[in-house]
């Protein structure tokens, strides 16, 4: 298990990572989600000991991270930047890594096969496409057969086949009992891969939750109502205990799947309606709302993590 305790990183005025505390458990894929610039890569570099925290700490199974003589046997990582010596062949790149980490030579062949690069093992890594480079990066991460794996935006630049391959691989690695921690700025990607979700925005923790739970909370259903008498309709619905907000185009949005109730209320009250339609906000919308609010609210008041389900679907602050 990986444990972050009040991890903080400042670059001058910028607080890239802001008192981040969470745990990453073995046996499942944990997604690390946040918009660009949220602090994901900085956090991962600190987890790997490649960047020094301003304060706070990272612990692996209760122990502080210490640079060991053969780090690839403990933590495997695919970072965003390519760090392959472009003049070396794929095979020699891996062999060099294996030798400096006391890993047997035969493991190089094994990982090349695992990532599907055996046929190009003799080619220079500098000539590799982005997809091939990503595969080589994964091979390097797996070289030491480590119990912990960190992947920073691994699907960036991959074709659909490569994306599916990496998703399946991460699930397989977690299924073997390893700790798999993977970052992305795309909610849709995380929804397909991760079982658990850590969401950050501006370096701060916004949610630490099961994926199913996040989906259940955030897949909001609401009923869109257009009427020439919005104020009366608003009143009728509110009196019935239905939460209503107003969309930018003047339509009302009632939280919940209550189209039948709304239709009946309208008929009983003699209200004309031009539209009663059931809508659902996508997960991507939920993620946008969660992180947008963090940008809007610059107050120092600490937020309650995991309350995102209580927000309104749209038209916040426009209640009539
Ligand atoms: P993410 O990976 O989520 O896109 P990063 O961790 O790369 O976010 O960046 C978080 C913030 O820290 C950004 O504002 C970025 O500009 C800043 N930052 C990252 N690395 C450095 C650095 N070496 N020097 C100065 N600022 C940095
Ligand atoms: Mg990044």
Image: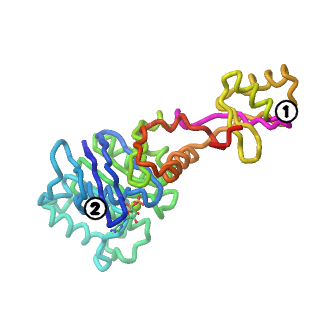
User: Is 317 positioned to the left or the right of 181 in the image?
Assistant: right
Cα distance, mark 2 to mark 1? Answer: 62 Å
Residue 74 placement (x, y as % from top left): 19, 52
Label 1 Cα neighbours within 10 Å, binned few <14 / some 14-19 / many ≥20 = some
Q: Helix, strand or loop at disc 1?
A: loop
User: Is 202 positioned to the left or the right of 18 in the image?
Assistant: right
Q: Is residue 313 visible?
A: yes
The image quarter containing residue 198 is top left
Q: Helix, strand or loop at disc 2?
A: helix
Residue 6 placement (x, y as % from top left): 28, 47
Residue ID at (48%, 64%): 157
The image quarter containing residue 238 is top right
Write down the residue under mark 1.
273
Q: Which mark is residue 140?
A: 2
Quadrant assignment for ligand 2: bottom left
Residue ID at (19%, 42%): 61
What residue range appears in magenta? 215-230
């Amino acid at each position: 298990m990986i444990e972050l305790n009040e991890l903080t990183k400042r670059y001058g005025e910028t607080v890239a990572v802001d008192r981040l505390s969470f745990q990453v458990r073995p046996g499942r894929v944990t997604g690390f989600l946040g918009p660009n610039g949220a602090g994901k890569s900085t956090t991962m570099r600190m987890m790997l000991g490649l960047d020094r925290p301003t304060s706070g700490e990272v612990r692996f199974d209760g122990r502080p991270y210490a640079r060991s003589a053969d780090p690839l046997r403990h933590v495997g990582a695919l970072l965003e930047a390519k760090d392959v010596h472009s003049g070396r062949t794929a095979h020699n790149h891996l062999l060099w890594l294996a030798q400096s980490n006391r890993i047997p030579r035969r493991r190089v062949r094994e990982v090349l096969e695992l990532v599907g690069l055996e046929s190009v093992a003799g080619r220079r890594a500098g000539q590799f496409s982005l997809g091939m480079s990503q595969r080589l990066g994964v091979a390097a991460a797996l070289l030491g057969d480590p119990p912990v794996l960190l992947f920073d935006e691994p699907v960036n630049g991959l074709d659909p086949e490569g994306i599916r391959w990496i998703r399946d691989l991460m699930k397989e690695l977690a299924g073997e009992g390893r700790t798999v921690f993977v970052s992305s700025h795309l909610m849709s990607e995380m929804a397909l891969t991760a079982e658990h979700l850590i969401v950050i925005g501006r370096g701060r923790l916004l949610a630490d939750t099961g994926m199913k739970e996040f989906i259940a909370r955030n897949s909001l259903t609401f009923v869109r109502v257009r009427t020439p008498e919005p104020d009366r309709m608003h009143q009728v619905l509110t009196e019935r205990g239905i939460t209503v907000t107003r969309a930018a185009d003047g339509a009302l949005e009632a939280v919940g799947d209550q189209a039948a109730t709304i239709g009946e209320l309208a008929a009983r009250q003699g209200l004309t309606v031009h539209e009663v339609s059931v809508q659902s906000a996508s997960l991507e919308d939920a993620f946008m709302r969660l992180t947008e609010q963090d940008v809007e609210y610059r107050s120092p008041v600490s937020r309650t993590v995991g309350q995102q389900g209580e927000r309104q679907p749209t038209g916040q602050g426009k209640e009539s």
